[in-house]
Image: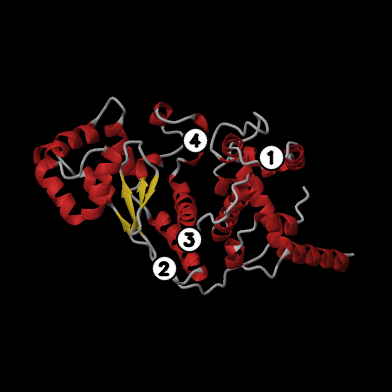
Amino acid sequence: MRKIIYILLFILALTSCQKGRTYWPKDIATQEVEIVRFDNALLNVHEATVNEDIAVLYAEYPEFMQDWVESVLGIPSYDTAYLAEVLPQFLNDTLYGFKYTNAREKEVFADISDLQKELNKGFSRIQYLYPETEIPTLYLFISGFNASIFFRDEYIGVGADMYLGSDYEYYNRVVYEYQKQTMRKECIPVDVVSAYLFHTLLYTSKQNRLLDQMIYRGKIMYLTAQIYDELPGYEVMGWTKEQWDWCVKNERAIWHLVMDKRDLFKTESLVISSYLNDGPFTLEVSQESPGRLGIWLGWRIVESFMEHNEHVSLQELMAEGDAQKILELSLYKP
């Protein structure tokens, strides 16, 4: 009897191992992502020495300082006299809670070792897949609740004050409840890596059907999930576990609803945005559903495609622009 149990356990373990695919060898070269603490430099600006401090910021961070002034403050970067008036007000504002927020940011981001580790892991795996990848520099900055991430060819900027914890009280004034789930420090690596993939692996389909958009976004989510393969799916999606479980439980009904409505092949922007854009729910499906349900469906289709086509590499998956082909070969039948 004991022997039979051991055999069954062995078969179960073997089946579990074969269910997913492993894409990463253990000896991937570690790539170091440079994290620039522009946030700290900015918070060291003092009203009494503001002109000198601004000059230092422009000298030490010439390109980023210019972009930050224009993108976040919305003023011409060359107007340093006006900047000297605005910047102290921005940093010390109490009406919108910036002064308190800046103190909170210093506390939350005092130690970024975990963030460094996860970003290194993410970009090491990206460079393993695409050796020509140039690892971008990452700048942490203060956004005044104005931006989470922005891109330039040379760097990625991350608004650290947008990642202070889902329970941070001042977020109640600036975002909706459903948006708070991803406003945590530990969400930064997935946000940065997925944004980088969207930025570099561009949408190439000549059709703009819901199906094409779903599969494209589903491929990005699948790749992100493989890069951070220790994370549960709901963390990669930016959902709660309850939202994920609801979708899994209702997956068959969701798919049949989408098929019955013939939404997959629609090109109307309102239909596409309803399935793909963030929101409290996906209007085309149910008010009980989470937002971005179309992206999750695309991910599930891609996941099924990769399970049924083990000869396809990650690079080949990302290069495949035929969404119809992926759907058909996925044998997706929830």
Q: Secondary structure at mark 3?
A: helix
Q: Which label number is shown at residue 31?
A: 2
Residue 24, can we see it?
Answer: yes
- CA distance separating discs 1 and 2: 42 Å
**Residue 317 x %, y %:** 61, 63
Q: CA distance from mark 4 to mark 1?
A: 26 Å
Which amino acid lies under the numbered mark 4 shown in the image of this protein?
A: Gln
The residue shown at (31%, 27%) is 96
- Between disc 1 and disc 3, whose residue precedes? 3
Give whichever of discs 3 and 2 has the lower sequence position: 2
> Residue at the location (70% across, 67% down)?
310
- Are the residues at dot 1 and dot 2 in contact (C-beta closer than 8 Å)? no
Classify 10 Å Cα crowding around label 4: few (below 14), some (14-19), many (20 and above).
some
Mark seen at residue 51: none
30 sits left or right of 211 in the view: left
Give the image location of residue 159, x and y in percent.
36, 44
Numbered disc 2: secondary structure: loop
For the residue marked with disc 1, what is the amino acid?
A: Asp
Q: Which residue is mark 4?
A: 179
Identify residue for label 3: 122
